[in-house]
Amino acid sequence: MIDLEEVSMHYGNFVAVETLSLHVPQGELFAFLGPNGAGKTTTIKMLTGLLRPTGGRVRICGIDMETSPVEAKSGIGFVPDVAVFYEKLTAREFMFFIADIFGVSKEAALRGCQELFARFELEEYAERRIEALSHGIRQRLAIVAALLHEPRVLIIDEPMIGLDPLHARTVKRELRARSREGMTVFMSTHLLNVAEEVADRIGIIDRGKLIALGTMEQLVAKAEGGQRALEEIFLSLVGQEGEENRGG
Ligand SMILES: Nc1ncnc2c1ncn2[C@@H]1O[C@H](COP(=O)(O)OP(=O)(O)OP(=O)(O)O)[C@@H](O)[C@H]1O
Ligand SMILES: [Mg+2]
């Protein structure tokens, strides 16, 4: 469903992502972890066609992002790290605006909006202008807007930022339920407990390189120091890489 083939992103001499290859099959909930500045958002921007890789190839549902960007993007729901809204629109108007862009019919948009607003407890904000919404409410709106066209692939950069525990749970459940129904989810997160709880598979990126990939069981089995918790595994891997780099 999501295919990265030796994808790189260079900013001048700086290498933000280096020959990253990764396949995320349909229905998988994939968690992408890594320290600040590791290259998560850069990778996500290449996956969604916002950034053109300096090397390699991105395919979504088998469609090449470089040669068929419109077709590739039509299958994606995207929640960026910092969502962009039209501040003067109401929450409901924004949903219909998004429906229009993705060619969702009026009836489907009405039904989808109603269902999603109910599930994410957004009904009371439906007629409010986005500029007047709190951070967490905006984040919930960004998530439901990305789900409105029933994307086959959901790409979500730090979904839990700003969410209260109740709505963080709603999002976790929604992502799990959708992936069981066949939606592929690519999620970056710093919340290791969330990754451990919901992800089918975990990838860890550090300094632009994928340094670990597998199910929680596989990561535990590979941990050289016998670590069992994701936090310990993460810290030992990222710490180690840091030491090596500083040493050499
Ligand atoms: N437009 C740009 N020009 C130059 N360097 C950039 C640009 N965008 C990002 N970078 C650099 O690329 C690296 C990766 O950044 P990226 O935003 O992908 O990290 P991240 O893993 O998402 O980090 P965080 O956890 O802080 O969100 C960083 O060193 C960043 O400074
Ligand atoms: Mg980021």
Image (spheres, rainbow, N blue to C red):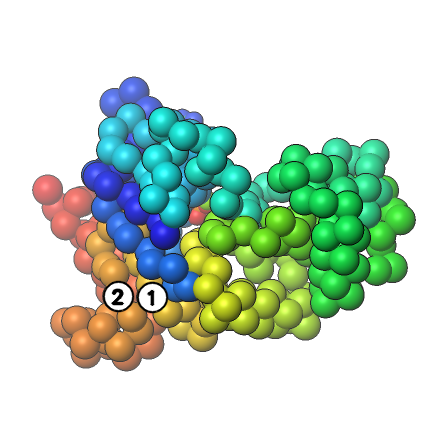
Which residue lies under the disc numbered 1?
201
Q: Is residue 169 visible?
A: yes
Among the two numbered marks 1 and 2 on one chain, the one whose residue lies closer to the N terminus: 1
Give the x, y percent position of residue 229.
33, 76
**Looking at the picture, how far across and down is residue 50, in whole percent?**
47, 31
At x 33%, y 38%, the residue is 58
Q: Nearer the viewer, residue 142 or 110?
A: 110
Residue 214: image tag: 2
- Could you say which is closer to the camera, residue 175 or residue 182? 182
Neighbour tally class for label 1: few under 14, some 14-19, many 20 plus, Cα within 10 Å: many
Q: Amino acid at mark 2?
A: Gly
Which secondary structure lies at badge 1?
strand
Amino acid residing under circle 1: Arg
Residue positioned 87% across, 59% down in the render? 124
Task: Confirm whether residue 45 shows in the render.
Answer: no
Q: Position of residue 195 (x, y in %)?
A: 43, 67
Marks 1/2 in contact by CB < 8 Å: the verdict is yes
Q: Nearer the viewer, residue 129 or 111?
A: 111
Q: Quadrant of residue 233?
A: bottom left
Whole-percent x, y for residue 155 in the image: 48, 50
Horizontal relation, residue 92 to residue 79: left or right: right
Residue 240, located in which quarter of the rendered image?
A: bottom left
Q: For disc 2, does the CB lie below 8 Å from ligand 1?
A: no
Assign a secondary structure to mark 2: strand
Residue 232 disc label? none
